[in-house]
Every structure is written in C-alpha cells, then in structure tokens.
C-alpha cells in the first residue's frame, strides 16, 4: 500500500448532529468513551498499511486538528509515513470554499501530484466501521477498474438515503441511482472509493462538477470504468443524533458487530481531556454498573445501566443513568435521573433533576418542535457546558443549548417534551 494515497474528507458541517457540532467538525465528535469519529478512518488506514494520508478540513477544524496532531497515535510518523491536515482553501473568490466532495479533492490536486500513487482512496471521516483497504485495492487492480465503489446491502426502505448501484455478474456497475425514490437494487454506496490516480486527475480537470455521488461516479459509469467492492461488515454513518446514539449502544451489544477492542481502534490519548494525567476509574461500594463503558477518571457512586461514560464523568450517590452517552467531565448530581440522554462535555445535572423522561410515555412523545427531523424517538440532547438546575425536569426529544446556565431557566424549571431551551 506504499503506492496508495488516502484522502479523508472531514470538512462537512454535519448539521443533523445539532448541538454536538456547534463548536466542532462532525469527525471530531467524541464517540464510545475515549474515541472520536475520525479515529475509525485513521485506524483503518494504519491497519491497511497506508503510508500517506491527508485529512481535508473546513468547518470548525480546530478540535479536529488538535486531535490528529502529528499523527503519531496512528503510527503516521517518520520519514516515510505521514498524515497531513489540509486546511480550508479559497478559490478565485474569497468565498469559494469547498462546494462538495469532488470540489474538495480538486482544490488539493497539487497534494495528490506531490505524492506518487497508483491509486487514490477517497474516504469519509464520519463513518464507524473496520475495513482492510488492502482487500479493496487488490480487488480494484484485479478487475482492471478505474473506479471502485465500496458497497453493502441495505434494507429496501433505506435505499432512498444512498447512491444505489446495479451490478452485473462480473462486479461491473451497469446502472447508478443517486438516492432514488424507488430503487432498482438495494446495493448501496458507502462513500468509499478507489480511483486510478491518473483517471481521477483527468476527471477532475475535465469538469467543474462538485460531488462524487452525483457527478464523478455517473461519469465513470458512462465511461464503462465503474466496479463495485462488496462489504459485509459493520458500517454506520453517524450523521444523525439517532444514528450516533444507536452506534454508541451497539458497543454494548456483543452481537452488533461493533467491537472496538478487536478492531484495534486507536486514538490520541495525549489529549488533556482523554487520559492525560487522569486517575483510574473509581467505582465505589454504593455503585451499581451494568453493561456500560466506564472510562478513566470516572467516579461512580450511583447506578449506571447500558451507558457510555467518557473520561472524568461523575455519577453521585443515588443518581441513575440509563441508556445514555455522557461526554467528558459531565457531573450527574445526587438523586438525578438521566435516561436516553446525549450530553456533551462539562454538563452539570443538578441534584434531584430528571432528563429524558417523557411526561406520559404511554401516549408517545412529540418530536422536537424546532428540529423534528433531529429528535423524534425520545432522545434528549444537552449541549456543552450546560447546567440543568437542581430539581429541574426535562422531557423527551428536548434540546438544552450549549452554555445554558441556571439563571436562564424558567421559574418552573420544567422543559416540556419536544421543547428547546
């Protein structure tokens, strides 16, 4: 894989993750306790023997750039190994930021040309999966393809969310539908591509089209150069609040196929809010912990069930955390009840408060009134540095914005189902 170059797209806004991306890029969102979403693409590159990779940033890149650092966490260090962060660029006009995935690669053609490669892998920095790219590149070469798309079978009802390929017996893609209303196939693109380098450079220079799925892939189809690579492992796009929560819960399900230890996922543990100078976890004799991930620096005196706790989380005596994802240094005070909540870093749940508890679970919980497509299944989302006061009650499908303080709450201290503060 010394002659393959990886380009990792990590500049998208990811607005469907709502407050989790209000101050960071989607690939920098914490996941599974000590990891970030970008760790999966970088770890895959490391395990696949890729020596040169680039991460294309744009939207709020600071935390992502800090996390990647020198690349040492993924063994991208030394004279012959590197991961480069390619920051946002402008085109001829000052407002010309990346207009799409293909445009992002086009604006970095000089980086591709400066690194000899037979193939260029185009990867997304916001997917949870484990793939050996060596197998895909080998398949690409054996097929004599100019472009190979990683594809997997999805339920028919989800085909409208993907690029869909119709494949012949030789693995050649003979037809392509981008997010069709009624699909001819349920073989879906994963947004992972292998391009013959010269073909990619030529295709980018011959057109000003902006997106791979809508423009470059259909061109390769017309040229008769498009092949598929079938993947049957675990893969999830965590671009929505619901998908993000479900993927975290999959860590706790031994039959889900998501196995962080077996996959060998690496992260930058030198970051101060991960494990740097943190003590071991402390689970006291008053605690009850079942089927949960408890990270270093956590102190648990209450009950934690089916939940993910990032470093430094404190669950005080009498508190109960269920089916929740609590990020770094969040505090759940005495006798608080937290259920189906995703809380960003440094959140404080006050004594005796409750969050994620619908007013009447039997009658159903209304979707969030402002973001009905983001929160609809009863999950509640709490932004970074927010404070939930003592005794407050927060329903289901609620959003507490970042930096909300105790004085910002209504006098009732109640946030009804589907509301935002």
Image (spheres, rainbow, N blue to C red):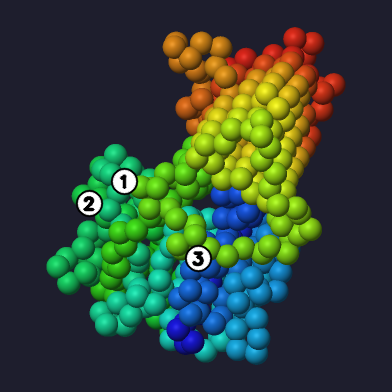
Q: Quadrant of the N terminus?
A: bottom left
User: Residue placed at 14% from the left, 68% from the top?
Assistant: 169
Q: Earlier in the sequence, mark 2 or mark 1?
A: 1
For the residue pair 333 and 326, the one nearer the viewer reads as 333
Which element is circle 3 on?
A: loop
- Please name which of the two marks, 3 or 1, marks the residue nearer to the observer: 3
Which element is circle 1 on?
A: helix
Position in image of residue 271 (x %, y %): 74, 60
Position in image of residue 172 (x %, y %): 22, 70
Distance between the alpha carbons at the discs numbered 2 and 1: 8 Å
The residue tagged 1 is: 159
In the visual, does 345 lie left or right of 367?
A: right
In the visual, does 47 lie left or right of 380?
A: left
Q: As displayed, is residue 371 above or below residue 412?
A: below
Residue 409 picture quarter: top right
Q: As displayed, is residue 132 above or below residue 381?
A: below
Distance between the alpha carbons at the discs numbered 2 and 3: 33 Å
Mark linked to residue 185: 2
The residue tagged 3 is: 264
Q: Do the numbered discs 2 and 1 sit on residues whose CB atoms are within 8 Å?
A: yes
Residue 55 appears in view:
yes
């Amino acid at each position: 894989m010394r002659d393959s170059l990886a380009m990792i797209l990590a500049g998208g806004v990811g607005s469907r993750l709502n407050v989790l991306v209000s101050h960071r890029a989607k690939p920098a969102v914490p996941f599974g306790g000590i990891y970030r979403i970008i760790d999966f693409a970088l770890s895959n590159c490391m395990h696949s023997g890729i020596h040169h990779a680039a991460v294309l940033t744009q939207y709020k890149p600071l935390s992502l750039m800090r996390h990647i650092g020198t690349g040492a966490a993924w063994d991208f260090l030394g004279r012959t190994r590197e991961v480069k962060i390619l920051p946002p660029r402008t085109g001829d006009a000052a407002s010309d930021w990346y207009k799409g995935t293909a445009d992002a690669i086009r604006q970095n053609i000089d980086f591709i040309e400066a690194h000899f490669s037979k193939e260029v892998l185009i990867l997304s920095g916001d997917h949870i999966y484990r793939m050996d790219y060596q197998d895909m590149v080998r398949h690409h070469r054996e097929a004599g393809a100019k472009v190979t798309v990683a594809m997997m079978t999805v339920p028919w009802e989800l085909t409208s969310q993907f690029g869909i390929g119709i494949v012949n017996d030789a693995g050649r893609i003979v037809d392509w539908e981008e997010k069709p209303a009624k699909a001819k196939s349920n073989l879906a693109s994963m947004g992972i591509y292998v391009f013959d380098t010269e073909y990619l450079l030529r295709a980018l220079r011959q057109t000003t089209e902006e997106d791979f799925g809508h423009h470059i892939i259909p061109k390769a189809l017309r040229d008769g150069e498009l092949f598929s690579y079938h993947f049957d492992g675990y893969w999830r796009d965590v671009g929505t609040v619901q998908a993000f929560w479900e993927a975290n819960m999959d860590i706790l399900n031994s039959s889900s196929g998501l196995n962080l230890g077996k996959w060998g996922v690496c992260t930058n543990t030198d970051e101060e809010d991960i494990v740097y100078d943190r003590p071991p976890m402390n689970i006291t004799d008053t605690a009850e912990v079942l089927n949960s991930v408890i990270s270093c620096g956590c102190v648990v005196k209450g009950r934690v069930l089916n939940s993910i706790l990032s470093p430094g989380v404190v669950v005080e005596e009498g508190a109960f955390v269920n089916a929740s994802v609590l990020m770094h240094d969040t505090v759940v005070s005495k006798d608080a009840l937290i259920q189906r909540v995703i809380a960003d870093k440094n959140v404080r749940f006050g004594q005796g408060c409750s969050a994620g508890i619908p007013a009447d679970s039997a009658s159903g919980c209304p979707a969030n009134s402002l973001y009905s497509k983001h929160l609809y299944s009863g999950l509640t989302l709490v932004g970074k540095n927010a404070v939930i006061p003592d005794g407050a009650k927060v329903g289901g499908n609620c959003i507490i914005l970042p930096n909300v303080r105790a004085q910002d709450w209504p006098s009732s201290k109640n946030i009804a189902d589907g509301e935002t503060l």
